[in-house]
Amino acid sequence: MSKSWPWREISGFRNVLVHNYLGDIDPLTVKAVVDKHLPPLISSVQAMLADDASSQP
């Protein structure tokens, strides 16, 4: 079973970055978030895709 991810918060973070809601975005903060959270998110999504592919007829 894959980890449950806070998809709404992930989408919200994307919106903040894309639309620059907070003014100047601190690139070091973005890098820290990406470095910490992106690798496990990628692994989780890959596992979900593999599970889905294996369940296809």
Image (tube, helix red, strand yellow):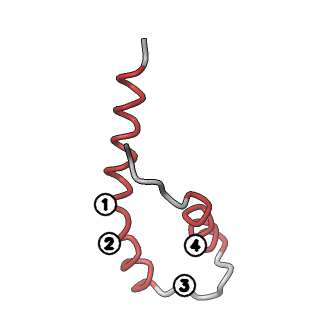
- Outermost residue toward the front? 1
- Residue 16 x, y percent position in the rendering: 62, 74
Q: Kindly identify which residue carries mark 2.
A: 35
Front tag of 3 and 2? 2
Precedes in sequence: disc 4 or disc 2: 4
Q: Write the residue at 32% across / 59% down.
A: 40
Q: CA distance from mark 2 to mark 1?
A: 7 Å
Q: Residues at badges 2 and 1 in contact (C-beta under 8 Å)?
A: yes
Q: Write the residue at 40% across / 39% down.
A: 48
Q: Write the residue at 34% across / 41% down.
A: 47
Is residue 42 placed above or below 51 in the rendered structure? below
Q: Kindly identify which residue carries mark 4.
A: 17
Characterize the local packing of mark 4: few (<14), some (14-19) or many (20 or more) Cα atoms within 10 angstroms: some
The amino acid pointed to by label 1 is Pro
Front tag of 1 and 3? 1
Q: Kindly identify which residue carries mark 3.
A: 25
The amino acid pointed to by label 3 is Ile
In terms of image quadrants, where is residue 33? bottom left
Q: Is residue 17 left or right of residue 5?
A: right
Q: Residues at badges 3 and 4 in contact (C-beta under 8 Å)?
A: yes
